[in-house]
Amino acid sequence: MKEQLQKDFYNSIKNLSLSQKDIEIKKFCLDNFIDKGFPNKKEEDWKFSDLNQIIKNNIGELSFYNDQASTNKVDTSVFVDGLEHNKIVFINGRIEKIDFEYEKKDQIEIIDQSETINKFENSNSLSDLNNAFTNKCFKILVKKGYHLAKPLIIYHTTNSKIWSKNINLRLNFELDKDSSLRLIDLFNDASEKNFLNIFYNFELKENAVLKNYKVDKFENKNIKYSFNNIDQDKNSISETFILSSGSNFSKNEINCNLNGVYASAFVNGVFSLNNDKHHEIRSIINHLTENTKSYQLIKSVLEQSSKAVYQGKIFVNSDAQKTDGYQLSKAILLNKESEFNAKPELEIYADDVKCSHGSASGSLNEDSIFYLMSRGLSYQQSRELLINGFLLDVVEKITDSEIKNLIKNMLGIKE
Amino acid sequence: MDNRQKEINNLKDYKYGFSTDIENIQAPKGLNEDVIKFISNIKKEPAWMLEFRLKAFERFKVLKEPDWQKPKFPKIDYQDLYYYSAPKSMKDKPKSLDELDPKLLETYKKLGIPLQEQARLNGIAVDAVFDSVSVATTFKDELTKQGIIFCPISEAIQNHPELVKKYLGSVIPTSDHFFATLNSAVFTDGSFVYIPEGVRCPMELSTYFRINASNTGQFERTLIIADKGSYVSYLEGCTAPMRDENQLHAANVELIALDDAEIKYSTVQNWYPGDKDGKGGIYNFVTKRGLCKGKNSKISWTQVETGSAITWKYPSCILKGDNSVGEFYSIAITNNYQKADTGTKMIHLGKNTKSKIISKGISAGSSDMTYRGLVDISSKAKNSTNYTQCDSLLMGNKCGAHTVPYIKNKNSESNIAHEATTSKISEEQLHYCQQRGLNPEEAVGLIVNGFCKEVLQQLPMEFAVEAQKLVGISLEGSVG
């Protein structure tokens, strides 16, 4: 893999106009990655999902060089109907379109930050890989006091031109004081056996509100890793919703730092898996100052030999008195081959806190099915109704009604 | 007899705390094959036992000290320890309590364990361990009548080799983790219990451990076998004298329950925790594992952990037999600079297996406490259930309380429920108690005892009283 990485690396920097210093930094990151390789189960954070093995089994040899000179045609059929929205379109990792047609132009700034390197805490070798190979990176700045009129949808599209490739992309967001952003990440893959490595960094200033919905719904054979770093100032709110369903393997990581008082973070997730899919959500909420709040709810429905993993950590610093932290994960295993693993973790250094977590996994409740069947529903109908209600609980947590309806439709959940 | 009298006369005055000065036979410092042969030789062990030890030592050489645990400790120089020391007067074993070294008996008295009295009044057979060799075994006759074997493991190796050979290392193999392997190589003594088929052990079996000679790591090995349809309740209690040097304790405890058998294992651990500044104290790195081998068998661990500078142990159950049950009840209290990383593992392999985990952690002062547990339901363990509850209580903002549960469910017909909470003693509760005339310390004691009640209830009577007192004593000075 080493030769391949080096060859692809020189190919990819060849076409970029980088300063000597930038090249050196990128080279440094590459060497770091070569040194560590893909994360494997020997690392505590990857204990339940051995990415190295998964890539080996599903893809085999990866190549890292993407020729991004030519443009791809934007397929408008993937766009969401019935919801007016702003767009950013990635095709095969290349930004094809940035369109904020519904917004005031002077309130949003798009800054080219391709030369900056992101260093994340609680991160891994994949951030080195990302830093070494991303060649375009934008920062989207929402200015003070501005609320976007329409949600922003980021389309992550791949087409059949790519195969066994690693795609790296990175975006930075800054929400200035009193601003807000609704963001949907929508995955749409027509390709197979690629590894997508996505890093987002969010900076939320005072009173800013971020709502991020990640929707990976459509069946595909790709492997995805997504890392979100969220830094939150005073009174800010972040809401993250993850629908984890379509890809063969997917791992979403949320690292949230509550730096300002009264900041709050919400992480909600749904795993709806079938076949041999293996998905994971790992969240780390760092309560770093007083009076911060976090709430997490993760629900899974697992069919066939699918596997879901939830690793959630609540960290409370010794300064973070009056913290309120809550975490709940529930899973229904529908097949004897399916598997649910959880590691809900609390690390607490302050005494005046209220932190709790719960985790439950098991089969569908036979009593409930009996109850419904005795009222005339078939077994299949009862089952669907119960699963429907189980998942609805999480979807109802979405605070934006337009997007809630969109996601309900996608999941086929009825009220 | 004359010889022993002479030795007793030669004993020097007490030096520290209540460390008894009895001349020790010590193996040369360090760890190598010769030391292992020395231990094996002095215990007059058969060849297969030496082989067992050497095999473990071979494995130990390639293993690395684990470093994933939360409480970090200075590197232990395993070559700088004594691996065997025994009170010299024990070379020829006394036949009854009266023959015991009076000084030994006095030490026990200071610790509040009047051996004869306790044995007589409480009906407990006490197998006291002084350093590494068992001193006295009482109530042997009554146990013998029922066919129960309760003796030091070194004796069992001589007298019941077929049982030891069959079961020793069957739950904790010689190739297990670092400290367990070390124990397999150099273990000196411990208890052996065999309950024959269909026998309900008429009394609580108990061992009081006591660490004495400075610089000797204690490597106890306990093996309890409950044959078909039998029942036994075993108590383990520990106290240690004041000492400034860290002492390593790496015991191995193996429990085996056959069809329809039940083992109840209770521990009150109150070893020297170090002084107020975190100096000294015992390192308690124990491997405890129970195997529910037969159908309908049950193993229950109850522990009250208040002592030791570092406690690092996970009493576990392997639920292999169908319908077997595993339970774990724990109270862990850390104060000052104590650190604890404790919890349990419940491995469900058989059908209809059940496990229950109740863990209560209390940290005060500058201490740090971690619950770390694993619940693993394998794909064959149909219709299994687990219930886990771990609550932590924090007192003051310099301490830490952590919960790290690993939950693996590979069976759709099985259910796992886990909950954990972390909080502090509510002002309202304190206010309520104080209003009724309790001082703050009493109020905290009362509330904490209530917090722990679920676990304290599981202890046998004799222990429950002692444990309740311990809970109060351990938290002294942590309020206000």
Image (cartoon, coloured by chain):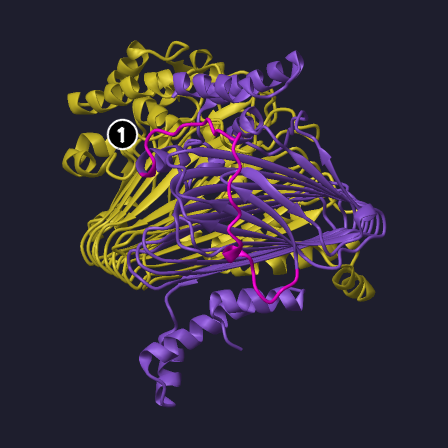
The percent coordinates of residue A74 (x first, y second) are 53, 47
**Circle 1 sits in a helix, a strand or a loop, which is it?**
helix
User: Which residues are drawn in magenta?
Assistant: A58-84
The percent coordinates of residue B72 (x first, y second) are 56, 27
Q: Residue furthest bottom?
A: A375
Q: Nearer the viewer, residue A362 or B327?
A: A362
Query: What is the magenta segment's predominant secondary structure?
Result: loop
Amino acid type, callout 1: Ser
Q: Nearer the viewer, residue A200 or A321?
A: A200
How many numbered marks, from 0 up?
1
Mark 1, residue position: B154
The percent coordinates of residue B203 (x first, y second) are 34, 54
Colour chain B appears in = yellow
Examine the image and state in which quarter residue A396 appears: bottom right
Q: Residue furthest left?
A: B162
Which chain: purple? A
> Is B418 located above or below residue B98 in the figure?
below
Identity of the residue drawn at 60% across and 33% down = B273
Position of A308 compared to B397: left or right? left
Regarding residue A182, the answer to whether it shows in the image is yes
Mark 1 chain: B
